[in-house]
Amino acid sequence: MNRILLAEQIGKYCVTAEDGQRIYEQIHPLLSAQQHVQLDFAGVQIVASPFLNMAVGQLLRDLDPATLNTYLKFENLPSGFKPILRRVIENAKRYYADPAYRAAIESVLAKREEDFDAD
Amino acid sequence: MELRLKIPRINDDPSDYDVLFGLWEQLASDETHQTVVLDFAQCDFLRQNGVAFCLGLARLAQSYGKQIAVENLLNENVAINLRKNGFMEALGLPYDRYPSSTAVPVREDVCRNVEPYINYLDKHWLTGRGISLSADLKQIILSTVVEAYTNVFDHARSRIGAFTCGQFYPRLEELALTLVDFGIGIPATVRRRLNQPDLNAETAMRWVFQEGNTTQDGPRGNGLKILKQFVKQNEGSLDIYSENCHARISARGERFTLRGRKFIGTVVQIKLKSDDKFYSLSSEDDSDELFF
């Protein structure tokens, strides 16, 4: 079991997308190799969606829900934050379930970034 | 020569925002004056939104290379409030620091500082005599409100950052918080995201509140929806002003209206109850648990 103590690695506030990306990069290879991962929220006081989007939501890009239910466990996540986690996962499922929708979004976003760069 | 911005009584109704946005228009369109005077002669009341917005105006003026002066603080309550809530101190003017049970210091963030911001909200906004919120509920409120704060730095592109001020209204058992940025505004972000330059502000604001819509790459875009759901469930309200659109979210529903005044930037105003008894959080979610 690979235990990730978020309070040690991130701190008591798990909020930003950048911190979520750090966790994603750590756990994605483990889960892809079908190793068990435990995300431990002990000592974490604040959890927000930008962090969860990146740490957890984007796992659904190439890992299926059954695999994630088997290999990824959330420990000590206060019950008040569970609705946020569920929302993030449902949103990610919807996003990755429709490749055409996703491709359309990413195409427009790429153009937008070009526009911004040109500004 | 000076540009004189006359600040009247400021509450937090849409008409008060029209006044604030009118001041912003004066400043944004001014190309001649080197000094901007914030003139409080006609101001006998200033809510937290007015404090945050006026500090933002001052910083915006300074970003244009203009000098700032504050004059005619004739009303004693307004003067005391601005001296003790950090407004005068931020502008390098004489200030006082003595405790207040209801006023929250004004805060400015040029860049994202999540931890100090959460500590500020916890210490100054959610803690005090007359506020009765459990530690667990505070955590949920903080995690919800910080969504609005991170949005500023993820989306707004505000060169002068974000301005926050809060207030506790004991008789109403209400906590109010206003967050202002002077970035590109929500409708402009949506237009670029959808590649629809002619989209009107109301349509853009409606779009951003709809499930599944995001202005960012990847499975994101939950922040405003989380905030919306939270205030609807817990007798709160959320008002967002951007360009000429006002979005009002509460348990009564969602209302989007076009206003006469336009503001390039975003104001987020959150009102929450100050006592646990008003909150109806979903029952304990201890199912352990197939999240995916």
Image (cartoon, helix red, strand yellow):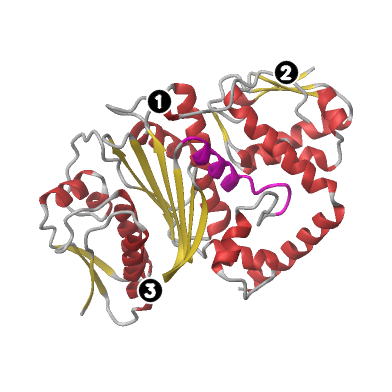
Residue that extends furthest to the right in the rendered view of this protein: A33
Left-right relation of A51 to B30:
right
Number of marks present in the image shown: 3
Amino acid type of the residue that numbered disc 3 sits on in the rendered structure: Ala
Tell me the chain of label 3.
Answer: B
How would you classify the magenta stretch by its main secondary structure?
helix
The front one of B117 and B226 is: B226
Query: Which disc is residue B288 wearing?
Result: 2
Tell me the chain of label 1.
Answer: B
Q: Is residue B221 a member of the stretch shown in magenta? A: yes
Q: Which residue is mark 3?
A: B28
Identify the residue at image location x=67%, y=33%. A85
**Could you tell me which secondary element the residue under label 1 belongs to?**
loop
Q: Is residue A56 a member of the stretch shown in magenta? A: no
x and y percent of residue B265 in the render? 46, 63
Query: How many angstroms separate mark 1 from mark 3 (CA)?
Result: 41 Å
Q: Which residue is mark 1?
A: B133
Q: Which residues are magenta?
A: B217-234
- Tell me whether marks 1 and 2 sit on the same chain: yes
